[in-house]
């Protein structure tokens, strides 16, 4: 049961690995344990000579519905600072081998941010991306104001983060957030095809490309991420965060008071 939330399959002949997020009843909500297991699995595969490209996926209904709201709901700002998950996310960011997100259904909040931490995104026609944190009284905290801005531009990032609207696969493709849209039954095989193409290339050249493109995309990003994280944790000092997350759990409309 060590990795119950991440199911890993290595396809040795193709030199690729598939990591499946596995909390289906909770719509793959990214709790702390799942994120730690994902980090550990990716780090192990990064060091595994049999593997040259990784795919992170969920299931047909959902990639993941974001961080686990039930785990966060009662936390205050200091609790969040003490837990600080940023090192987990930063470790994933530093994985040298390419990572493809294969997305069907919802990729929301931290899951949309996880997709953006990956290097490429293959989506099914049913995929929906969003940063709905505003609806539960907080804000994106793991790149959703930083990488999203870089991926889709200011106006679209503002709209997505301020209204929480989910965008369709077609919109995500038009915005430049994702690489491909394919029918639902093909999203994983299409990602595997892409992974295999990459795995057949020189692994050193692939890693150099990943490092170089990320360097260009991420200059000034770290400062932005620090500010975003500070603000995200700070919001756990508000009543609106308690109200927003309780309302989600109690399945009612939140009443935000601005305090
Ligand atoms: N957390 C916990 N449980 C969740 C969940 C979530 N994010 N999303 C869904 N669930 C649970 C529901 O509570 C429900 O549980 P039961 O009632 O059956 O016990 C079950 O999954 C099925 O969900 P629904 O009944 O709601 O299913 P629907 O099809 O009606 O709706 C939905 C699907 C995805 C539209 C809806 O569930 C939804 O809106 N979910 C919440 C989406 C959301 O707000 N996500 C953002 C969460 S905040 C950071 C790292 C990460 C983050 C921040 C910082 N650092 C490193 C600093 C990330 C933050 C977030 O992602």
Image (spheres, grey):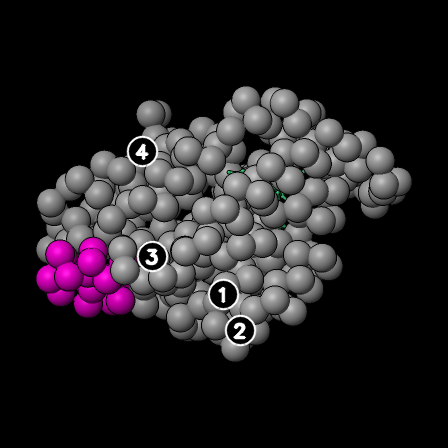
Q: Residues within 10 Å of mark 4 (few under 14, many from 20)?
A: some
Q: Earlier in the sequence, mark 3 or mark 2?
A: 2
Give yes or no for residue 104 being in the magenta stretch. Answer: no
Q: Which residue is mark 1?
A: 151
| Callouts 2 and 1 close, C-beta under 8 Å | yes
SS category of the residue bearing label 2: helix
- 3 or 4: tag closer to the N-terminus: 4
Quadrant in the picture for residue 191: bottom left
Reading the chain from its start, which is encountered first: label 4 or label 2?
Answer: 4
Q: Residue at x 27, y 38 (%)?
A: 43
Residue visible at 53% across and 73% down in the picture? 175
Q: Which mark is residue 40?
A: 4
Q: Provide the residue designation for mark 3.
A: 215
Mark toward the viewer: 1 or 3: 3
Q: CA distance from mark 1 to mark 3?
A: 15 Å
Is residue 66 visible in this depiction of the protein?
A: no
User: Badge 2 local density, few (<14 within 10 Å), some, or many (20+)?
Assistant: some
Q: Residues within 10 Å of mark 3 (few under 14, many from 20)?
A: few
Quarter of the picture holding the C terminus: top right
User: Is residue 194 found inside the magenta-colored segment of the image?
Assistant: yes
**What is the magenta range?**
192-210
Which label belongs to residue 175? 2
Q: Quadrant of ligand 1?
A: top right
The CA distance from mark 2 to mark 1 is: 8 Å
């Amino acid at each position: 049961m060590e990795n119950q939330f991440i199911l890993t399959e290595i396809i040795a002949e193709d030199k690729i690995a598939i990591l499946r997020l596995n909390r289906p009843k909770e719509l793959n909500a990214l709790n702390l344990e799942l994120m730690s297991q994902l980090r550990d699995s990716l780090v192990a595969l990064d060091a595994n000579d049999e593997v040259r490209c990784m795919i992170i996926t969920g299931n047909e209904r959902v990639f993941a519905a974001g961080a686990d709201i039930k785990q966060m709901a009662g936390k205050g700002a200091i609790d969040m600072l003490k837990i600080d998950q940023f090192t987990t996310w930063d470790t994933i960011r530093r994985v040298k081998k390419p990572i493809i997100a294969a997305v069907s259904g919802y990729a929301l909040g931290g899951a949309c941010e996880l997709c953006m931490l990956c290097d490429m995104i293959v989506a099914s026609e049913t995929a929906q991306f969003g940063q709905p944190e505003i609806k539960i009284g907080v804000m994106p905290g793991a790149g959703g104001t930083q990488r999203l801005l870089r991926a889709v531009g200011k106006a679209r990032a503002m709209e997505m983060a301020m209204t929480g609207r989910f965008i369709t696969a077609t919109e995500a493709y038009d915005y430049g957030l994702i690489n491909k849209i394919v029918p639902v039954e093909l999203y994983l095989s299409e990602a595997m095809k892409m992974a295999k193409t990459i795995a057949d290339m020189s692994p050193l050249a692939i890693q150099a490309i990943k490092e170089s493109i990320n360097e260009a995309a991420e200059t000034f990003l770290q400062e932005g991420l620090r500010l975003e994280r500070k603000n995200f944790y700070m919001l756990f000092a508000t009543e609106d965060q308690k109200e927003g997350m309780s309302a989600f759990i109690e399945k009612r409309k939140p009443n935000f008071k601005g305090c």
